[in-house]
Image (spheres, grey):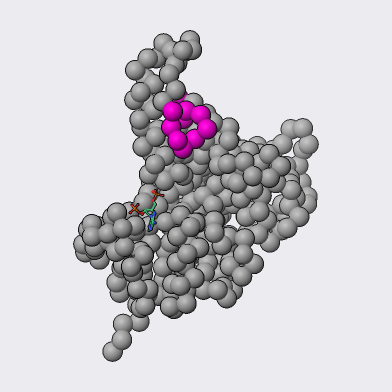
Amino acid sequence: MTDARPTVAVVGATGAVGRTMVEILGERSFPASGLRLMASHRSAGSVVDTAWGPIEVEDLAQADPAGIDIALFSAGGDRSRRYAPAFADAGATVIDNSSAFRMDPDVPLVVAGVNDAAIADAPRGIVANPNCTTMALLMATGPLHELAGLRRLVASSYQAVSGSGQAGIEVLSQEVAMLSADREALVRGGWKDPGNALYQRPIGFNVVPLAGSITDAGYTDEEWKLVNETRKILGAPDVAVEPTCVRVPTMAGHGIAATMWFDRPVSRAEAIEVLEGSPGVEIWDDDRVPTPLDSAGRDDVLVGRVRGTLGEPGGISLWVVGDNLRKGAALNAVQLAELLLR
Ligand code: A2P
């Protein structure tokens, strides 16, 4: 008798998101008959403890995709572009965490719990996992769009360094250690630039109001993702999105301060009622302020500071924060794999 349970692969299994994917597959007792792990030749041969026992990491460049049913990719856009189509051709459904295929009209872009039905239409055998900031934002915005039709959205992100992978975590740790050696210089000036290669300016004890790199019209690629992915996920190509993406010195948890207006006025009470009824969203009231530290390690996104707009009444301002490695990446990918099994 053949085993009907799927064989799952995690590509980029040694990275910040990939390791979280492996953990979450185990935590949720994903019904896989087997798990394969892939990364670069640097990690090939290393062994990872998983819920399926110790598994040796394979070199992606040498790996044979035959027999894989579901492949979760988080090894960067270049690897996705190069290998994901071959995995799909070999029979796998690829769930890709990179931005490589997100805007491809033949690739659904799905936030589990917001636009689940879209996953059914994946003619290339590839499903895209949205950008981590868009994901957290849409967990709050999606249900409100459903309620009243989103028309306009102003969003400023506060993005953690783990969004840049393991390298971001290293850079922040090193800079905090180096810069805190001279606290006086941090207060009065004269600090020495540690000179990281990842961000435009130091990130330790600092805020960098430019996450990603500038592309069109003075906006960064991260900001364009917020615009384009929001429209695609909501199926609302005319929604006006005004994004500013900021990198902040937190390890995990992307926060977004957002103000939105709809086809009709929405009251604070109405917004809270809808969000309280939305799976995967936890409302924290005003004396319990949800912060990135609170979000780390949690599956739910946290929403707080829900207010009616002042200048142009009828809109809603709120703060949403979510673990960028979990709902923002690995958890959503695993939830999409669960949707595929249904
Ligand atoms: P490796 O650890 O062997 O370099 P992060 O985003 O946290 O930096 O993780 C990136 C993931 O992508 C890691 O698992 C990394 O593997 C993997 N990766 C990076 N470059 C390649 C490559 N050329 N081929 C396969 N996997 C890669």
User: Picture coordinates of residue 103 (x, y %)?
Assistant: 62, 60
Q: Nearer the viewer, residue 136 or 265?
A: 136
* Residue drawn at (47%, 67%) of the image: 84
Q: Nearer the viewer, residue 41 or 243?
A: 41
Q: Nearer the viewer, residue 134 or 179?
A: 179
* Residue 91 picture quarter: bottom left
* Residue drawn at (65%, 59%) of the image: 232
Any magenta on residue 204?
yes
Asked if residue 299 lies left or right of residue 273, the reply is: left
> Quick check: 259 above or below 61?
above
Q: Nearer the viewer, residue 228 or 332?
A: 228
Tell me if I can see residue 224 in this picture: yes
Any magenta on residue 214?
no
> Quick check: 262 above or below 122?
above
* Residue 23 picture quarter: bottom left
* Residue 48 picture quarter: bottom left
Q: Which secondary structure is most common in the magenta stretch?
A: loop
The boundaries of the magenta stretch are: 195-205
* Residue drawn at (58%, 60%) of the image: 102
Tell me if I can see residue 291 in this picture: no
